[in-house]
Amino acid sequence: MLSTLKCSVLTLLFTLLSYLTFAQAGVVKGRVADANDAPVPFATVAILTAADSSLVKADAADVSGAFAIIGLPAGRYRLRVMAVGFATYTSAPLAPGGANLGTLVLKSTAHALGEVVVQGERPAVEHTLGKTVLNVRNPLFKTASTALDVLDRAPELVVSADGALSIAGRYAPVVYIEGRQQPLTADELRNLAAADIDQVEVIANASAQFDGETRAVINIKLTRDKTLGWKGSLYGGYSQNHRQAGYQTGGSATYKTDRWAYYGRVGYALSPNYVTNEALRTVRTAQEATLFSSSGLHTTVNRPLSYQFSADYALRKNHQLGVFAKGNWAPGTQDLTSLTEQTGQATGGATPGRILLDVASHTQLTPSNVALDLNYAGTLNSRGDKLLAFADYATYRTPSHQLLQNNFRSEQGAALRLPFVLAGQFATDITIRSLRVDYTHALGKAGKLELGSKLVDTHSANDVRNDSLQAGDVATGTYGYDASRSNQFRYHEQIVAGYVQFSRAWNGLQVEAGLRVENTTARGTSLTLGQELDRRYFRWLPSLKVERKLTEANSLTLSYSRKMERPAFWELNPAPLYADYYTYIEGNPFLLPVTHNTASLSYQHKALTFSANYLLDKDVFVQIPLQNDQTKVIRYTRFNLGQQTQAWLDVAAPLSLTRWWKTQHYAQFSSLRTQSAYPSGGTIDTHGWQFSVDGSQVFTLPKGYSLEVKYFYNSPTTSSIYYNYANGSVSLALQKDVLQKHGNVQLSVGDVFNTYREHFATQYQNIDLDILQRRNTRQATLRFTYNFGKSTFSSKNQASGSAEEEGRAR
């Protein structure tokens, strides 16, 4: 791993040095003056598309009248200059690749419009105020086949081996599609083809406009064009890992008329997965030390069917009514087989006793969800005031059945005690209703005031019923209701929220300041235990972003936000879920919401970004082990840590070294400290350092081929009571356009050298535990995508009202 680290660092340094010599194309600059050659300060300078005069980029001249607009993507444009007291000015035709226009004289009459042609392509990554934009049409993303692949190539965004998303490995973002907030599973993101995506916006520090639990945002914008009619794509793929095979198929289509816009998407997959597990656990008492050595295989096979449909109707100009529906049905199975060798060594050196525990578990589950959204969007006047309204309804159903068998035997195979068998029936039923209204009031051309409110009502019912032989008749093999391992839990939550946000742009300065307030009333009831718990809490959640443009290629951004995070509904359910006789997990109805404070200072030079970040979390959710040394049972429960502080420095460097070689790297050096009481007594006070690097090299080869080499490395670190060992991997992808670019073939191999591991250990109080897990990260996938038709499709860029709560229902 040390050599891997050295290679990663050298690669990063090489790309950074190469970046310093990289020249940026597509720059238009000049000076604005009046007829007497006096400067016209703060004039508005805009680049518009030649076809429909849509705004591409805009800036303001400085006090001397000078301006520079950089980073223009390929296309045909118009240059326009406007200032109070002067007629609009339009440039003469400019040379491709950008130009220095010299002095532009504002007169009382406008000149003929000219067109600007900027050669090249949109950069892979762009930055605006607190936002990173990924242009998926850039060759850097050419080998990405799914939405999850695209996100895996985003700087600062981490995709784990099981498909979970996080910002810098710390907190999960909320996913939007075309501005609609949607809590998507990893399988649903795999069912969304990269060919359908035009851009991805990543907001690492979400403002007060977003829900209190939304710390970061990913907005996926779908591909659009400029003609009426149909457009769509179909895809199919096959994957093979070390043990299992799977496939994916699906498609999407859009249809647009003058007043109607339709969009539909469906995806289906056979999605196998596996995890191998090796664990060592030592339990010590005054009389003996017992070693549990186990190895197991956990396999899952899911068959997710995901679908989405939307229809937008133009009531009249600038007023639209829309309906949106999405769903997911994912029947599947989970199988666990493990062997645990239990060796007891009595104090004084007596001959150790040995017991073998065979575990077999089979679970069938059929989770499903449906979400409906009715929305209105309108521009109210010529000033640009806007009104958005949403009514949402969502349901989640997760019925499942489990048979768990534990057999205790000697090395010779003789039964040593009665088997421990549980037949479980589990059901989760969640219903979410919400109303939301947003209003935007324009403050001139450079500012706006935004107001909004939201009401959410959530009902959750969780039933866990376990029948066991011990509670029935062992002699006849009859199961009986096991009240000690069953529970009926009900949860009702109401949220009232509102926000105000002000934003304005001055000469080279952009400011966005907001305040959100949320009031939560909740009641949790255990019908089985006869317990009831009421919660009420109110939170002030401010946010601030300030960006200062230093020069045409340099800027500084400062951001701060306070957010809150409520526990997921399953985390509140105290019912135990067993992995084997000695191990189970449970929720905690007494969990408090987490408070997150995040601050960031970033410096951007062209496409290169340096950031210094600080995070203070209070009452953080963690899953911790608690062990009974007498029964040797270990239970994992949810718990609020007192405080965690994190600080990290990072750098993101996407760049083009040549026309055929593009690279992207993200590196991070971080510190994490945890300070908290422990529920069994004592305190936690740990500190850890970590270095991580994530990079890719994309090569455009002859005859239309593209090759990508992708890699990452995470150094060892300490987190709460655990020591996490290093991990990393290298992946390859090859693609080629076929059928006159209507089709595309992609071949990818993940974790080529099978190096990825999840290895962690702890020795804290009476817990002595070491766990090593391997996943199906080494997997080959072959995928074909076919695109057909053309259409205009421009979904409204807005969010539905209930997706924050839907995310907690996962």
Image (tube, rainbow, N blue to C red):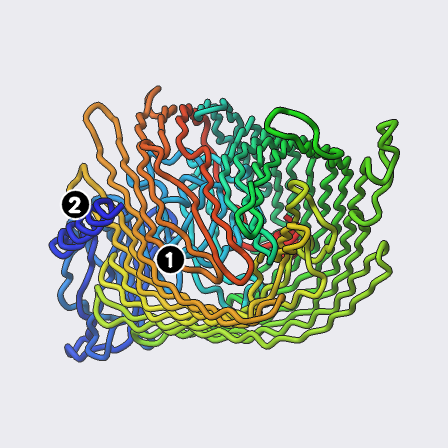
Q: Is residue 351 above or below residue 668?
A: above
Taking the view exactly as shown, the residue that stands out farthest to the left is 21
As shown in the figure, which amino acid type bears the numbered disc 2?
Leu
- Write down the residue under mark 1: 717
Q: Looking at the image, which residue is at 34% across and 55% down?
A: 56
Q: Which element is circle 2 on?
A: strand
* Image location (x, y in percent) of residue 236: 48, 23
Instruction: Name the residue at 67% across, 54% down.
Output: 630
In the rendering, at what x and y percent does residue 355 appear?
62, 36
- The residue that appears at 81% across and 60% down in the rendered structure is 525
Q: Which residue is mark 2?
A: 657
- Residue most toward the top? 739
Bin the neighbour count of mark 1 within 10 Å (Cα to Cα): few under 14, some 14-19, many 20 and up: some
The reply to whether discs 2 and 1 touch (Cβ–Cβ < 8 Å) is no
Q: Earlier in the sequence, mark 2 or mark 1?
A: 2
Comparing 198 with 458, the one in front is: 458
- The one nearer the camera, 582 or 162, is 582
Residue 801, image x and y in percent? Answer: 64, 57
Image position of 653 (left or right of 10): right
Question: In whole angstroms, how far apart are the C-alphas of marks 2 and 1?
Answer: 33 Å
Q: Looking at the image, is mark 2 or mark 1 nearer the viewer? A: 1
Q: Specify whether residue 438 is in view.
A: yes
Residue 591 is left or right of residue 132, and the answer is right
Q: Quadrant of residue 553?
A: bottom left
Q: Position of residue 695 (x, y in %)?
A: 28, 46
Asked if residue 257 is positioned above or below residue 622 in the image, the reply reads above
Whether residue 401 is visible here, answered yes or no, is: no
Label 1: state its secondary structure.
Answer: strand
Quadrant position of the N terminus in the picture: top left
Which sits in the foreground, 501 or 707? Answer: 707
Amino acid type of the residue tagged 1 in the rendering: Thr
